Amino acid sequence: MSATLCESRTGPLATLATTRPVLTVRLDAVAYNTRVLAARARRLMAVVKADGFGLGGADVARTALAHGARALGVATLTEAVELRTAGIGAPLLSWLDAPGADPSDAVLHGVDVAVPSLGHLEAAVAAGRRTGRAVAVHLYLDCGTARDGCAPELWPALCAAAWRAELTGAVRVVGVMGHLACAASLDPQANADATARFVHGVARARAAGLRPALRHLGATAAVLGLPATRFDLSRVGAGLVGIDPTGRCPVLHAVAQVTAPVVQVRDVGAGVGVGYEHTYRTPAPTRLALLPLGYADGLPVTASGRAQVLVHGQRRPLAGRVSMDQVVVDVGDLPVRTGDVVTVIGTGDDLAPTLTEWAGWAGTLPHELLTGLGRRLVRHVVPAPPSTSPEELA
């Protein structure tokens, strides 16, 4: 397990940073991002799946709820129960459980569940009958991902079955949801087509006798760049933690910073091979600095040969491959010593490489890198400011 610190950098954290890699989680940035996104949505659902994108699900959830979010979303009932166990009582939706899973926990903990198939509906009905309480469900329509959601040709049958199930009192259809396949690209035609499928799907649900109060289709990219897709509720996860999937709306603040101490320094000549297979050879006499983190801590091997870090205010390249527990930096003639703190992933406040840059070097998404930051990293949590008042949100 990683340690967690809340001290300032002038206290124990400052000392620890010179001996251990540190992941700083800025809940103040989560608060800021929530306010920005809530101002653009009719109602904001904070998606805190995968332990809040790896940054602490309960912490991110509480911060978002205090600064404009009105509901929470997770992928699984297990995640939902963890939030309830942490004492969080906000409206909560889980949308990616297997059709054979028992949703009784949803009833017991007051969690809404997504229903993308007749099998899911049958499980919800069984749970409602078993507990004697109606399961709150959101019918889930596939709007073009060919992934999760009910296939359009099966949608009328699902809506009809859900209406019959409502008559028994076993379920309540409180929402209809979908997902956009091309929101990040802001592709006008693809998103218009998906939105039309969703609108048609809602109309079919109402024609079947259902009266869902919530329609939700868009996530972070849609809130930032597709106002026509916002409907009653917007599900935002990546944006809370500072990720802009569109790459076109620089209004969010980065939430995560990773630093690491220099644990070894050596001066070498030109032509020295570094790391496994000597994929890097020093082009001239130089100084090499060793950092104690690697792919087991979330640094992608695929960024080898391209990634940089910030040392003494200058960007310097990684030398050789990212190993499991260590990376080497070619620091040139910088006066680096053991104990110096290097910024591996920055927040955009200085010249340090950002999460987005690392994703580009690795050929992946910033989402993947963020959720993969290792448990060995010491966590320093910067608290959020006080709750936002209703007047500020207006």
Image: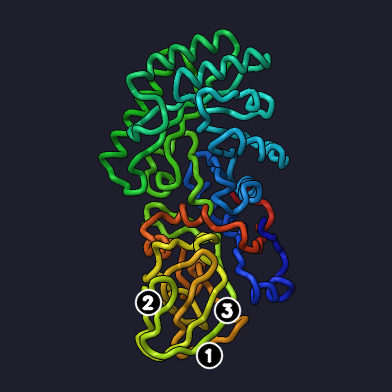
Query: How many numbered dots are placed on residues in this image?
Result: 3
Q: Are marks 2 and 3 in contact (CB under 8 Å)?
A: no
Left or right position of 142 against 124: left
Left or right position of 225 against 48: left
- Whole-percent x, y for residue 25 in the image: 60, 60
- Distance in Å between CA atoms under marks 2 and 3: 19 Å
Viewer-nearest residue: 266 or 300: 266
Q: Are marks 1 and 3 in contact (CB under 8 Å)?
A: no
Q: Are marks 2 and 1 in contact (CB under 8 Å)?
A: no
Q: Residues within 10 Å of mark 2 (few under 14, many from 20)?
A: some
Secondary structure of the residue carrying numbered label 2: strand
Secondary structure of the residue carrying numbered label 3: loop
Task: Please name the residue shown 55% across and 65% down the image.
Answer: 257
Residue under pointer 2: 280
- Distance in Å between CA atoms under marks 1 and 3: 12 Å
Secondary structure of the residue carrying numbered label 1: loop
- Whole-percent x, y for residue 65 in the image: 63, 45
- Whole-percent x, y for residue 84 in the image: 69, 37
**Mark 2 or mark 1, whichever is nearer to me:** 2
Residue under pointer 1: 335
**N-term mark: 2 or 3:** 3
Viewer-nearest residue: 249 or 19: 19
At label 2, the amino acid type is Tyr
- Whole-percent x, y for residue 145 in the image: 35, 35
**Mark 2 or mark 3, whichever is nearer to me:** 2
**N-term mark: 1 or 3:** 3
At label 1, the amino acid type is Pro
Q: Residues within 10 Å of mark 3 (few under 14, many from 20)?
A: many
Residue under pointer 3: 262
Above/below status of 272 relative to 12: below
**N-term mark: 2 or 1:** 2
Left or right position of 354 against 246: right
